[in-house]
Amino acid sequence: MTKQKPQLEFREEVKPEDCENVRQILVSSGFFSADEIRVAVELVEERLSKGLRSGYYFLFAEQHGRRVGYTCFGPIACTKASFDLYWIAVHNEFRGLAIGQELLAKTLQGIVNLGGTRVYIETSSRPQYSPTRSFYSKQGFEPEAVLKNFYDDGDDKVVYSKTIVHS
Amino acid sequence: MTKQKPQLEFREEVKPEDCENVRQILVSSGFFSADEIRVAVELVEERLSKGLRSGYYFLFAEQHGRRVGYTCFGPIACTKASFDLYWIAVHNEFRGLAIGQELLAKTLQGIVNLGGTRVYIETSSRPQYSPTRSFYSKQGFEPEAVLKNFYDDGDDKVVYSKTIVHS
């Protein structure tokens, strides 16, 4: 059976059930550690308790109200127009449908609308993350800096950046 | 009159009055923007409301209970043993007495005690921060990465790092 790209709805508003949505999306990838998932869910909780003052913005992709993928991003304190993309993930059931690409494009447009001009994504140098790094490169991000052994011995942090412009 | 190095007391515990202490230390330098000072005070507030769960550790240097300088640091989420040094500052009245050096040494020892092996400090490439960068270099930190135009056009972020070992 060929998977077909679902008709997606996008939502910026954050609801209490998004803690569980985010957890399901990240667990489904089999990719993230319990520690990483806990941190990701904490960002949803921060947003729920503090609102936009938390600095965490979200974009959820859904199909008939069901979780498909999401991004979490926000302005970097003490910078003029730089944003971090903290998380981008698509539920395993919906992989291979270019949904990550659509989520990223809509997120970058949201950042432009918020006045952002530079976007940063951090990821690991481990082989496991090779598809992730290829994805960022294909979307026009460039590896700008490497911090050796940042995550662990032999596990560097690679910082990708992209300059975006108001169209 | 020659300034003499005061007899300092060091304190890790955080008190409500430290919001004001941090504000005074940072304002005295004439160095930080209102935005930066607000963020620094927010870290104290986070620590007061959440305790160590905030991820923010502090070291205060005092003379007879009066604020002299401080550091703010903490483990970086999802890393094995990396720490950020978020803030290090000495009140202008006490500058030129090598107090920053003492604060940094004690902070690095604290990080070692917490199991940390790598420490990161971020700062700006602007000429104003040249003494800051020299200070980090003298203390054995190396400029490991540069993110161009991170803070603003022409204002890069320089990431310094240092590997520390249990003695």
Image (cartoon, coloured by chain):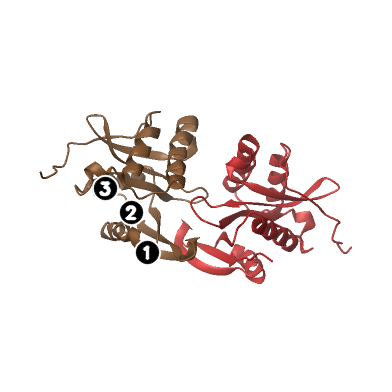
Chain colours: A red, B brown
Q: Which residue is drawn at 28% across and 60% down?
A: B134
Q: Which of marks 3 and 2 is nearer the N terminus?
A: 3
Mark 3 residue element: helix
Q: Kindly state the secondary structure of the residue where label 1 is placed.
A: strand
| Label 1 packing within 10 angstroms: few (<14), some (14-19), many (20+) | some
Work out whether mark 1 precedes mark 3 in sequence or the reverse, and give the earlier one.
3
Residue, disc 1: B143
Q: What residue type is labelled 3?
A: Gly
Q: What's the mark number on residue B13?
A: none
Estimate how packed mark 3 is, as few (under 14), some (14 to 19) or many (20 or more) residues with alpha carbons within 10 Å: many
Q: Which amino acid does label 1 sit on?
A: Pro
Residue B164 is marked as: 2
Query: Which sits in the foreground, B151 or B54?
Result: B151
Q: What is the CA distance from the residue labelled 3 to the residue labelled 2?
A: 18 Å
Q: Which of marks 3 and 2 is in front?
A: 3
Residue depicted at x 76% and y 60%:
A99
Vertical relation: B148 (above or below) B95: below
Looking at the picture, tell me which residue is in the foreground, A47 or A62.
A47
Which quadrant of the view contains residue B163?
Answer: bottom left
1 vs 3, front mark: 3
Camera-side residue of A116 and B141 = A116
Pinpoint residue A138: horizontal percent, then vertical percent: 66, 71
Task: Tell whether label 3 touches label 1 (CB within 8 Å).
Answer: no
Sequence-wise first label, 2 or 1: 1
Q: Answer yes or no: is residue A31 visible.
A: no
Whether callout 1 and callout 3 share a subunit is answered: yes
The disc at residue B100 is: 3
Name which residue type carries label 2: Ile
User: Looking at the picture, how far across and down is residue B75, in whole percent?
Assistant: 44, 46
